[in-house]
Image (spheres, helix red, strand yellow):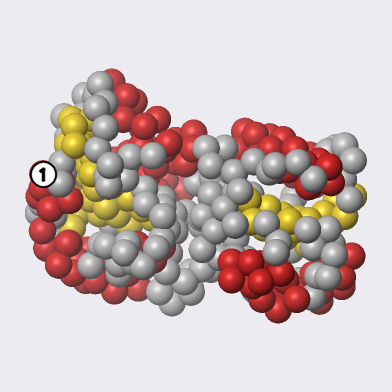
Amino acid sequence: MNVVFHASAGPDLTGRLGQLPGLNMSVCREDDTETLFRLLPECDVLWHVLQRCTAEMIGAAPKLKLIQKVGVGVNTIDLDAAKQRGIPVCNLPGTNARAVAELTLGLMLSVLRRIPSFDRVLRDSTWTDVDMQDGIGELGGRTVGLVGFGAIPRILAPILAAMGCTVIYTARNPVVDPVATYRPWEELLTEADVVSLHLPLVPETKHVINAASLNRMKQGAILINTGRGGLVDQQALAAALVSGRIAGAGLDVFEVEPLPADDPILRLPNVVVTPHVAWLTTGTFDRSFALAAENCRRIALGTPLLHRVV
């Protein structure tokens, strides 16, 4: 079975892909359009990561039997084009949850403790910067508001509670949780010292963080986004960060990716950024590849697929 892994891969990842039994795996970088369209005519299964899967790509793959998202969000796949061809689309919920939860926690600590700034000035031979030492915060004792309560927030909640945080959450379908307490959206914004986003990007959630919601947040709160870039109006966030209305932000995802080099967010000292790598660990890959390979086996046998979306 011919599988195209449409993402960049270093030596370790390439080796892991090559060890998967029964699959003829081709790795194609996201920016290598020429190679992609050379591979698509013989492609049976497309393993999609982040680069948009378009109707043109689907149309160039006459043998395509499955689009397998390596991750959760399928907003970057032209689902209508897949439906028209009768091509199933599957995702892998939960395989990256621990990795994303850990980086979310890391961003919270990095913003509050200014870890990247201290690292930078120390490398520039500055041992003591008195201005940077003012206002350093601890996570313990703060109220953390988790927006959404799926797999990632449920991993985070007990960790945050163990660190001394008060954990609140908002979700469409509230549940009883031993450490996290439900709050309606507006109440969470006004109560939380840290607001952390864990929502899918759908029309109802686009720019859920905007000028109005930023103004409702506590003075000096911080925002963390490891969900989807489109959840946040970046212009409004930049303005709130410049004014001091929001004390800081930790962002792994952005409205436009790759993030343009001249984006104002990159010039703000109270922002910690990472390039959409929250999910990117060897553990995520091992869990994801096992399930993706199983779906390849199932599509060959004609048996029901795991985590089918379309």
Q: Nearer the viewer, residue 178 or 194?
A: 178
Q: How many marks?
A: 1
Work out whether 20 lies above or below 242. Answer: above
Kindly identify which residue carries mark 1.
Answer: 191
Residue at image point 40% right, 30% down: 155
Q: Is residue 86 left or right of residue 180?
A: right
- Classed neighbour count for the residue bearing mark 1: other residues with Cα under 10 Å, few (<14), some (14–19), many (≥20): some
Residue 265, given in percent of the width and then of the height, sits at 35, 67
Work out whether 154 lies above or below 170. Answer: above
Q: Is residue 230 left or right of residue 62?
A: left
Q: Is residue 64 left or right of residue 172?
A: right
Quadrant position of residue 52: bottom right
Residue at image point 79% right, 63% down: 64
Work out whether 154 lies above or below 229. Answer: above
Q: Secondary structure at mark 1?
A: helix
Q: What amino acid does circle 1 point to?
A: Glu
Residue 51, given in percent of the width and then of the height, sits at 62, 66
Q: Is residue 158 left or right of residue 190?
A: right
Q: Nearer the viewer, residue 60 or 246?
A: 60
Residue at image point 10% right, 47% down: 187
Work out whether 21 lies above or below 185. Answer: above
Residue at image point 52% right, 37% down: 94
Asked if one can make out residue 172 in the rendered structure from this viewpoint, the answer is yes
Asked if one can make out residue 273 in the rendered structure from this viewpoint, the answer is no
Residue 210, given in percent of the width and then of the height, sits at 23, 67
Residue 297, given in percent of the width and then of the height, sits at 81, 41
Q: Quadrant of the C terminus?
A: bottom right
